[in-house]
Amino acid sequence: MKKLLFIFLIISNLIFSQEEVKVDLSSPKATLYTHLYFLEKDHFEPVKSAETIKDVDKSKAIEIILKIKEIYEGRGLKMDFKTVPDSNDYLDTITKYDDALGNALLHRYAPFPLRLPEVYLEKYEGKWYYSKETVDHIEEIYKDTFLLELGWLPQKFPKFFNKTFLGIRIWKPIFAIIFGVILFFLYKLLLPVLIFILVKIKNSFKKLKHIKTKDLIRELARPLLLILILWIIETLLPYFHLDKLNTYIVVGLNIAETILWIVVIIALVELILRLYMESGIDSKSRIEKQLAPILSNLLLSIIWFIGFLHILTLFGVRPATVIAGASIGGLALAFAAQDSLKNFLGTVVIFLDKPFHIGDWVAINDLEGEVESVGVRSTRIRAADTTIHQIPNSVISEANINNKGLRTHRRYTTELGIRYDTPSKLVKAFTKGIKEIIKKHPGADSNNYNVEFTSFGDSALLILVNVYFTKLEWGDEEAAKNILNLAVIELAAELGVEFAFPSSTLMIEQLPEKESLAPKYNTSDEAIEKSINSVLDNFDKEDNIERMKNTSTIPDDE
């Protein structure tokens, strides 16, 4: 029994004779631990905690260390001692001091460099203290944390409200409910007001007034108001003194606020896109209408990515680390998807340069056809034989593009060869008649054409016909050629002008009792005029204008 009692006394002595925690300022970790340890309820010794403040009166130092602790709690900042350096010679590699000699590393440490960079420690004479700058600006930092002077309010409550239940003062949940109800009605009251203001701003631009965007404006107004509500909650939260719970609430509020800002930016992008596309919608090319949503989705992805990076920083991850990791990951992804990236950049180039529009007839390298659609990766082109070709956008961005769809006219050039024995008078009449046909042609530019006797061929007199058709569709061009060519044949038949064959003709004229094989031409002015008028009258009667309206063989995508 005595042995058991002796063992019990030894164990009790070991338990209750643990080494007492002393003031330690040998490193950033030791100083911060000293500050916060001696302000806890179980070992509240503010005089020892005040040792972390240098060259300040004790009472003033106690006031400062209490305010620093309140600032930590009010902003929801929880000290993670595992990450705090425990070296007396710690050098800050992030914050550098510019002096005349260049960048110098300093013996300083900021526990929360992203969310509270104004509060940091510095090494003085071998010990670590809160910096002089922190001490000098503590009142400003405190006022920024506690925007409203409400510290007196709990003291005015009846005694019942200051009683505790499960470690929580009764007034805290009661006021939380009251503030929640007030904020709910504030949201309901301000939402229609904000929507009305945004609609008025939009309608102040005459070009945008007719565009219906109330649905998008509502989607923009809601998160904006919620951000205002969250700001009010963050402002009031420090006064509830929820200690450790406050840390998790503040982090949750910051995450929610980041997500709401992302939603606001997305709604703003969608609103701007609709206003852009519907303001003068007829003037927008189909390629703009097709690619704008694609680029919009890319922009939204970038916004979400930046928001995600910001959320990581709320958990103490440094932006440089996040960006470096994202850069390495992006580089690896770029190597793995080089072709896709090149094609996407080609899409951006097509959108910016607009080398063609949907429905244009283009010649790209050895391929010729109509542009049907432009996607993120490739462009669809339908060739003349109606087959579909998918060309990577990276190829298109570097190719020599002949956009025939941008022509103002379609040119048609041909040479007509007539017999060498055709009288010059009929040659003149034939060229004159073709000119008159072109002037009456419903699809030809009557002010821009050439019909001339240009040269002597091997077996024919050559007449150049150069005409420009005003309709740009391929089917319309072929129909216009058909009308012109038929009229030329009829004119030649009426005038008695014959087209030459690419051959040699042996003419025997001196045999007795044999008639000459050479054609007999009627070159009288009356006959020539009558023939030309006859062809032109028939040209009008055939109602070629109506024929041109219904000749396109390729549907117009526009």
Image: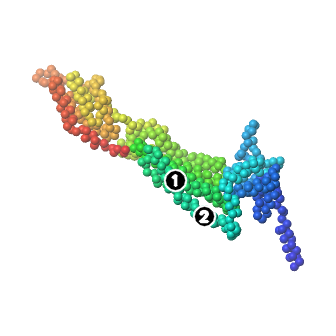
Comparing 174 with 404, the one in front is 174
> Which residue is found at the position 24% from the left and 38% from the top?
544
The percent position of residue 382, horizontal first and vertical second, equals 38, 44
Disc 1 marks a residue whose amino acid type is Leu
Q: Are marks 1 and 2 in contact (CB under 8 Å)?
A: no
> Which residue is found at the position 78% from the left and 65% from the top?
42
Q: Determine which residue is flagged by label 1.
A: 194
Disc 2 marks a residue whose amino acid type is Ile
The percent position of residue 230, horizontal first and vertical second, equals 60, 57
Q: Determine which residue is flagged by label 2.
A: 178
* Colour convention of the picture: rainbow
Q: Residue furthest bottom?
A: 1
The percent position of residue 246, horizontal first and vertical second, equals 67, 60
Comparing 144 with 32, the one in front is 144
Q: Is residue 244 above or below residue 500?
A: below
Judged left or right of residue 506, residue 186 is right
Q: Residue furthest top?
A: 510
Which secondary structure, mark 1? helix
For the residue carrying disc 1, how many other residues have a C-alpha within 10 Å: few (<14), some (14-19), or many (20+)? some
